[in-house]
């Protein structure tokens, strides 16, 4: 996810240098990666804390942090999808179809701020659709440009 988001931010930053989109993508990606990293790191610490005779209240607090941050951390990906939508629809720095998909995803993430534990599903779905779609888009674009070149 981090590599994909960084790649999108770099590509969009190069295609639309003055746009807010690349900054939104960078901020949203950084917050998502950092928050999920901390949440899942707590989950790893939690595995050892139960064996080390910790107080049950300490283990419960660590479990709550790990469980919450691990899922809540995906909500800021809505900034990434909003940035991609902006770059696609307003700045024309990405394919239009990606902008519409990202706009729908941004709306889903906005709604999921109240049900943050479900945010992992649209994250994975958006990453899959956007990644596969961009691969196909690049492949078709390269084939079209190769056919257009004189032999």
Image (tube, rainbow, N blue to C red):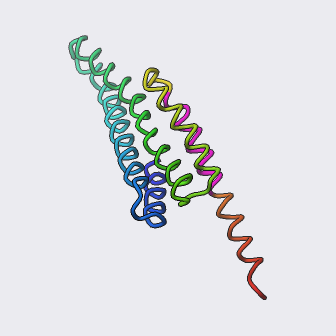
Residue at the far bottom: name it: 151
- Residue in view at x 68 percent, y 64 percent: 139
104 falls in the magenta region: no
Q: Specify whether 55 is left or right of 63.
A: left
Q: Main secondary structure of the magenta part?
A: helix
The magenta span reads 119-134
Q: Is residue 143 above or below residue 133?
A: below
Which quadrant: the C terminus? Answer: bottom right
Foreground pick, 109 / 36: 109
Q: Residue at x 40, y 46 (%)?
A: 29
Q: Is residue 7 above or below residue 27?
A: below
Label tally: 0
> What is the quadrant of residue 34 in the picture?
top left
- Residue 124 magenta: yes
Residue 108 rendering spot, x and y as whole percentages: 53, 31
Question: What residue sits 29% from the left and 14% below the top?
Answer: 60
Q: Residue furthest front?
A: 90
Residue 128: percent from left, percent from top: 60, 44
Residue 22 in the image: x percent, y percent? 41, 55
x, y percentage for residue 71?
A: 42, 28
Left or right of 43 in this view: 14? right
In which quadrant of the rendered view does residue 6 lie? Answer: bottom left
Q: Residue furthest top?
A: 56
């Amino acid at each position: 996810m981090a590599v994909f988001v960084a790649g999108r931010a770099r590509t969009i930053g190069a295609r639309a240098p003055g746009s807010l989109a690349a900054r939104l993508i960078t901020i949203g990606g950084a917050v998502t990666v950092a928050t999920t990293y901390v949440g899942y790191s707590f989950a790893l610490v939690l595995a050892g804390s139960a064996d080390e005779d910790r107080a049950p209240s300490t283990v419960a607090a660590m479990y709550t942090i790990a469980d919450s941050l691990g899922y809540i951390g995906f909500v800021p990906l809505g900034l990434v999808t909003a940035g991609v939508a902006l770059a696609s629809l307003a700045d024309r720095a990405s394919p239009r179809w990606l902008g519409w998909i990202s706009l729908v995803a941004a709306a889903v993430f906005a709604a999921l701020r109240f049900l943050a534990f479900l945010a992992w599903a649209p994250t994975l779905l958006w990453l899959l659709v956007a990644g596969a779609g961009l691969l196909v888009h690049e492949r078709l674009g390269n084939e079209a440009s190769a056919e257009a070149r004189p032999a």
